[in-house]
Amino acid sequence: MAKQKISELQTERKRFKPVLPAVLKNGPRSVKPKFGKATKSVSDYETVQRLFPNTYGMPMVNLGKGKNPAVSKKIIKAGVVLSGGQAPGGHNVIAGLFDGLKKANSKNKLIGFLGGPSGILDNKWKEITASFIDVYRNTGGFDIIQSGRTKIETPEQFEQTKKNLMDNKIDALVIIGGDDSNTNAALLAEYFKKEGVNISIIGVPKTIDGDLKNEQIEASFGFDTATKIYSELVGNVCRDVNSARKYWHFIRLMGRSASHITLEVGLKTQPNIVLIGEEVIANKMTLSQVVDYITGIVVKRAEAKKKFGVILVPEGLIEFIPEMKELISSLNDVLAENEGQLNSMSGINEKKDFIYTKLPENLASLMKSLPDTISSQLMIDRDPHGNVQVSQIETEKLLIAMVKTKLAGLKKEGKYTGKFSAINHFFGYEGRCGAPSNFDANYTYALGYNSAVLALNGLTGYLSSVKKLVEKSSMWECGGVPLTMMMNIERRKGKEKPVIKKALVDLNGVPFKTLLKNRDTWAETESYLYPGPIQYFGPYSVTDMTTVTLRYE
């Protein structure tokens, strides 16, 4: 087989050596866990405790320097799995985990389950060796063992997981994932405790969306790199629009359940309009009010002879608009209840006319007001559970169409004389597998190494935690957060389920207040910033800078 060619940048990045936090620098034998007070869940205390009787209330863990020769005396075999969507730095988590295990005892082994959690259920894996992992150090993507979105949730799946892990003599399993994946990790830790199975389950916080964070988890990995990639693209568009001065660019950014990405990119690039879903729902804005807000700025800029601008739209905006959320919920019910009758209809218009009769009058009127393409997407694009796939709705196109209609009305009234030409973009997958920034390369390596230390000490039901992230990586603090500590109860598919609470944009936080303070100026001026591409070489202030959000927080 021919040797795979790699790019010039990848050749240089292979030489990059992540800097470990000082507490981990001398290896697992020089690290001792220090236990804090008992913890409790973020809410729904009694329910979460009832669901997790064996793992609820565990103490916080901080790693400190100290002799710990016991971790080297036992040979362990660990498994690792990548779960959910990709995020820059996943390969370095596995590299850090591998190095931590080998530093404790060269006979320790690491295997990677292939294709996500389904690899555990199907018993598909490969051993991670030194020569194998070295090719993937400091690279983007999850292609080392691939990822998947299978959930381990049925009694049969839990039993199969136990069987396959025990058959492979696995002592610890590290699950690299977001809130849903780490909820799964918590359920597995609880299940193994209940079954008397001595397998450590350790989670690692991953998601570019930035919604897996709290007081203990300052950032999920991949957010830094992804937002730097999007910021470069948005900055390029800002420079283009400031050069051509004839288009409005509507840019939808990934991050369905929270607007962290949009806020971070907005602060980095300072475009004319930054929509924040959490603000929209807090103010109970209708779709029409959102359109009026955008239109008002377009008109004001046109009066100053500026027929151009840049607007950022969070991917999940539609779900944050209360009336749209209500429409989607009602649609889900109506489509499910009338599936047979709808399947017998041939055309989309016939189906829409039928649906209008089944929806409450106000929601039917709202749906009729939407552009045809959007109302059709609401009808056609369904997930396997029959629900609307909100992330597939082209919200930026919806806003363009409605702003155009609004401006046409204003023109007839003589209140607008400008010309509105719009271009739409969606930046999403471009950011998920980028080569990790120096920050993410260091952070993910530390998270992986830290998870090895937690597993070597026999801890289970913990999320790998690395804090003080605005400091140099050598000064970061390491430890573990009980997964149950981050739990609350949500209603999903008609049932109450324990889930790790998503972190939404804090409207009282400094990052959002900074946007609020500047948005009127940005709306009327060209205060654009041009961050440029990620810098891997050069002055520390550029190569290792954190996100604006993290600095402000």
Image (cartoon, helix red, strand yellow):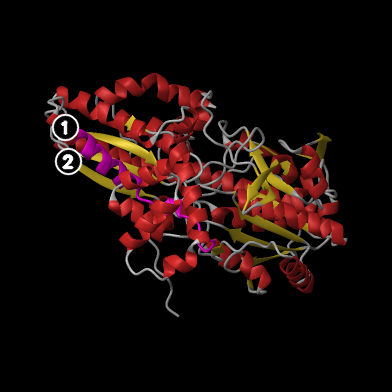
| Residue 219: image location, x then y, percent | 57, 39
Where on the picture, by quarter, is residue 214? top right
Amino acid type at mark 1: Lys
Where on the picture, by quarter, is residue 289? top left
Quadrant assignment for the C terminus: top right
Relative to 485, residue 138 above or below: below
Give SS at disc 1. loop
Gap between marks 2 and 1 measured at Cα: 8 Å
Point out the tag, 2 or 1, that comes first from the N-terminus. 1
Residue with the mark numbered 2: 421
Give SS at disc 2. loop
Residue 434 seen from this side: no
* Camera-side residue of 81 and 352: 352
Amino acid type at mark 2: Ser
* Camera-side residue of 201 and 50: 50
Residue range of the region highlighted in magenta in the rendering: 383-407
| Residue 430: image location, x then y, percent | 38, 53
Quadrant assignment for the N terminus: bottom left
Residue 526 seen from this side: yes
Which residue appears at 57% of the width and 61% of the height?
A: 149
| Left/right of residue 374 with respect to residue 110 in the rendered view | left
Q: Callout 2: few (<14), some (14-19), or many (20+) C-alpha neighbours within 10 Å?
A: few
Q: Which mark is residue 149?
A: none
Q: Which mark is residue 307?
A: 1
The kind of secondary structure the magenta stretch mainly shows is: helix
| Left/right of residue 337 with respect to residue 297 in the rendered view | right
Which residue appears at 77% of the width and 69% of the height?
A: 159
Residue 399 is a magenta residue = yes
Say whether marks 2 and 1 touch (CB < 8 Å): yes
Which residue appears at 69% of the width and 50% of the height?
A: 497
